[in-house]
Image: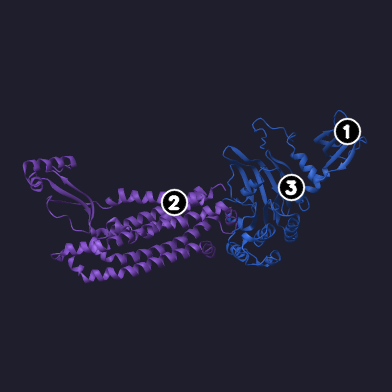
Chain colours: A purple, B blue
Amino acid sequence: MAWVTWRQHRAQLVAAAGLLLLLGLAALGTDIPIRSAYRGNALSNCLPPNARSGCDIIVRHFESQFGSWADAVRVVAVLPALAGLFVGAPLLARELEHGTHRVAWTQGVTRRRWLLSKTALLAAATVATTATASAIVMWWRSPFDTLEGRINPSGFDIEGLVVPAYALFALALGVLAGLVFRRTVAAMTATLVAFAATRLLVLTFLRPHFLSPLHWSILPTDPGPPAGDWILSDTLVDAGGRQITTGREDLAVQHAQLAGIDPHTYIDTLGWKRLVTYQPAGRFWTFQLIEAGLFVALAVAVVLVTLWLIRRTPT
Amino acid sequence: MSLPPLAAHGLGKRFGREWGLRDCTLTIPPGAIVGLAGPNAAGKSTLLSLATGLLAPSEGSISVLGCDPLRDSAVLGRIGYVAQGAPLYRSFSVAETIEFARRTNPRWDDAIVPEFLTRIASQTKVGALSAGERARLALALVLGKRPELVLLDEPFVGLDPLAGREFLQLLMDRVAETPTAVVIASHVIADIERVCDHIVLLTRGGVRLQGDVEELLGSHRILTGPRRPLGSIRGVREIVRERHSDRQLTLLVVTDRPIVDRSWTVEPVGLEELLLAYMAPERPLTPPTPERLPLQWHG
């Protein structure tokens, strides 16, 4: 089956290698100015424990200079979806569309072994490709990671173990969608929708609660929490711990202005506090393990469903 | 080989609310060359898809070489199947297609390949082959498996008569001396009557007729005589079809003894005419039973 898989999917594998090469070259080329600016401004001396005066200006300058580059690199978040769209979805849909499953599934290799071998080989290739991409991104982003942290979705989603895990899940989804929809374009669409929806649901509803978030209560006038943590919420609470609505806050500010008091001082006298809920930067690898494990488990479940369905598919 | 290569019992397949095949009970003897005849939409392709496990039966059972094709799908390695239109990977070259079969069949035998692929360059893409060349390549894939059962679904569609004849010749040269059973589904009887020694006639009502070709031709006769009211005729077990003009009556009958009545002209019947008579919907062999759906005909 290795030869058959290679013969049928070599175009995708070549494309994946090409994308990796492009990513590597782009990373190498853009890394040089970033590192020289990082070293030239001695940014490593500006990290929280030994921050010196003027650091915030230097950091802000660095971010304004290269922040858009870091944003651009977030595009690699679509790489895992590509595995689902262009490798997973056509795997069965193309066979069913052209009727060649009648050839493939009536040979000496049983249908399940055929599917399992192809999926396993392509999964291995997908993991190799996306893990390499993830490693390149981690290396490239290391200056940003030290300044901004990487537990924020902007870093978390494109670094570490989750990238190959997302790709495995997308691949499995694509194969299943191909079996269900039996048309390549329909399967690709369904894969994209299901993959994006799952990612979004996990990001919004599950990841913030992988471990119970920490709370930090400070005076409203205190400087914010240091960069590097993942801030889940940042709200004002009154002395009783109840959240203060923007309406109530506006009223307080108006009241202070009418009375000719500085609003900040006024709010302090009310006993209001700023409550920051966050996941600390130190939980990065724990969260990576949990989320990657979750997506690998989902991928396995989807493959099992596909294996069960393929036996009873009317063709 | 004692197990029948293909046996079905009460086999049915429903697609939504329509039955693609119903009440199919048949047994194919070892080594037989079977013509699977029947009008379009009679369920010939459905039967072959059920035999290869591409479909699961809705009712009844089917076994190939003694195995359930769905549960013991390893049996497919011993069956050669060419689906309608001989689907192959169009982007593969001829050599790659052969390599594909070699890699996916543990029993693969390269020896038969060359004679099938004379006059075809091995680097040609499958998509660029003529219909005849493509059919030969599909047949090479099937016979290289050294199959014990060959199932061909409408292999002559799209082939010119010469290519069709060549196709049959290649097939028969390979299987004539072996115990391999062959089932050729075709709605054109003329295409299969040259080679098959066994007939299964499938209509929407189920299996209408099956048996050895010699025996069927031996037991059926065409009687022609002056028009008269029909009573029982000595030697006739059953009247299959009755046709009359103003003065003449033509019957297709099943005989159990020689016909002695001199007022009838007795002639043998050809296979095509025999099958067409049984296909005729206006005179079913057995009247439809109440629980069975009436025969439906679609445009």
Query: Which chain is mark 3 on?
Result: B
Residue A284: where, in percent of width, then height? 27, 59
- The answer to whether any part of residue A245 appears in the image is no
| Residue A163 picture quarter | bottom left
Mark linked to residue B188: 3
Disc 1 target residue: B248
Farthest top residue? B229
Query: Which chain is mark 2 on?
Result: A
C-alpha distance separating marks 1 and 2: 70 Å
Identified by mark 2, the residue type is: Thr
Identified by mark 3, the residue type is: Val
Residue A23: where, in percent of width, then height? 38, 65
Mark linked to residue A191: 2
The crowd level at tag 2 (other Cα within 10 Å; few <14, some 14-19, many 20+) is: many
> Is residue A270 positioned above or below A223 on the image?
above
Q: Secondary structure at mark 2?
A: helix
Q: Are marks 1 and 2 in contact (CB under 8 Å)?
A: no
Q: Nearer the viewer, mark 1 or mark 2?
A: 2
In this view, the residue in front, B272 or B134, is B134
Q: Residue at x 12, y 41 (%)?
A: A254
Q: Residue at x 62, y 61 (%)?
A: B126
